[in-house]
Amino acid sequence: MKKFIYIAISSVLLSSCHIYKKYERPEDINVASTYRTPEGMSNAPTTNNIGNLDWTDIYPDEKLQELINYGLGNNTDLLIAIEKVNEAKAALSSARLSFLPSISLTPEGGVSSFDGSAASWSYNASASASWEIDLFGKLLNSKRKAQVALLQNKEYQQAVRTQLIATIADYYFTLTALDKQLAIYTITEQSWAESVETIKAMKEGGMTNEAAVAQYEAYHASIAAAIPDVKAEITKQENALATLLGDFPKAIARNSIDTQKCDIPIEVGIPVELLSNRPDVKNAEYQLAAMYYNTNIARSSFYPQLSIGGSLGWTNAAGAAITNPGGLILSALASITQPIFNKGVNIAKLKIAKAQEEQAKLNFKQVLLDAGREVSDALAVYDAELKKESKRELQIKKLSNAVEYTKELLTLGSSTYLEVLDAQQSLLSAQLTKTEDQLKKLNAITSLYHALGGGREIEAK
């Protein structure tokens, strides 16, 4: 009989070994080719990619730095994320304390009188304790799950932080681009006002006709009409940025887009760097680990639970009689509970936990795929903006020359007002496109920095 008991106990212990194992990343999650790089750009192993730089190195503009610092201290989403971390810390403390006995004190007292007899007092001052012995890892896995939840909330806080820095930068750069567009429209409108007066004078001299004047006035009006729209967009963008900072709508102090520097060496590193930096990737893996421990908790429900309890007290009431002086009462109890049949509840809980773990695993894979796509997209955009930068400068230079040449030819009678009009329209379009290119380049730097896990708090520089 003893041999049978030993075999049964050994079988239970061996079958429960899995519930003590710590989480390990599943072998079928491949991170070897998380993202690709544009042709000619290095993807060699390195620890010096821009995701490891402090955000102040990426954004040297002092006014932008002031805005980011203000946002980090006042943005409501980030403040909520910080409170979630505090909540998770409290939950972990609770899980750790579950290993300790629970103790309660229950003092009681009363007075009684029977059939007119003298009143008598009774009292009972007792303390009780209970302690669950964690033989099969239920409490251990609950603590590990709480630890992972804390790490997960910390990564969520980091994700909110990195997203906040990137969004503030994008809003700021958009404002500088709108300022540049407004300046282009304003200068062009003033130039066209002069052109209208010139074409009117030429008409008076018989060098052109009323149609030319009408065309010039119409185009001048279209440029003047665009200015209020740009100003309205600037106001909306300022309001959006102020709200993001946790402030009421207000004007935003800023520098010019032409002063923004992007002299950052792009060394994206190997895919494992993506895992070590990005908070959303780490968050997704912590979620998978939490579900792994949740499955272990569900498994532990199939094994016995051992509890030890006891009480210690002082009383003057022993049974129905009143005894004085008081006496000491001591009791102890140990119990073991082995689930045998629970209407399939434990089996259902385990199936649910396994399904949730698989969902977390699939989510982790998808987060990796999305992260790789974001890095690839940002690299492609940045590479394209670098390659066309000099070409756009050449285009504007040649179009500026064309405007001057056609104006001179018009005064000499060798060109038509339509050629001048076309040249000036092309120049305006190219100037606005250049501003868009500048914004795209700045946004691409931010996107790449964000996609590589930049903007997080770096403890040791």
Image (cartoon, grey):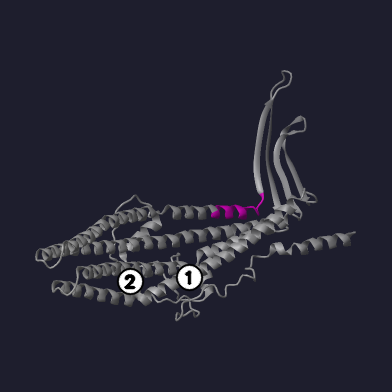
Q: Where does residue 338 sit, x and y in percent of width and height?
A: 78, 52
Count residues near mark 2 (Cα–Cα under 10 Å), then give few for <14, some for 14-19, many for 20+: few
The one nearer the camera, 384 or 70, is 384
Q: Quadrant of residue 287?
A: bottom right
* Position above or below: 183 against 87: below
In reply to whether residue 2 is colored magenta, the answer given is no
Q: State if disc 2 and disc 1 touch (CB < 8 Å).
A: no
The residue under the point 53% across, 52% down is 87
Q: Where does residue 398 sit, x and y in percent of width and height?
A: 25, 76
Q: Where does residue 380 sit, x and y in percent of width and height?
A: 44, 73
Between the C-alphas of marks 1 and 2, the distance is 21 Å
**The magenta stretch spans which residues?**
88-101
Q: Where does residue 177 sit, x and y in percent of width and height?
A: 31, 64
The residue under the point 34% across, 75% down is 389
Count residues near mark 1 (Cα–Cα under 10 Å), then give few for <14, some for 14-19, many for 20+: many
Q: Amino acid at mark 2?
A: Lys
Q: Quadrant of the N terminus?
A: bottom right
The one nearer the camera, 191 or 51, is 191
In reply to whether residue 94 is colored magenta, the answer given is yes
Q: Is residue 293 left or right of residue 261?
A: right
The one nearer the camera, 40 or 324, is 40
Q: Is residue 153 visible?
A: yes
Which residue is under mark 2?
Answer: 261
Q: Quadrant of the C terminus?
A: bottom left
Q: Secondary structure at mark 2?
A: loop
The residue under the point 46% across, 77% down is 38
The residue under the point 50% across, 75% down is 36
Which residue is under mark 1?
Answer: 375
The prevailing secondary structure element of the residues shown in magenta is helix
Q: Secondary structure at mark 1?
A: helix
Q: Amino acid at mark 1?
A: Val
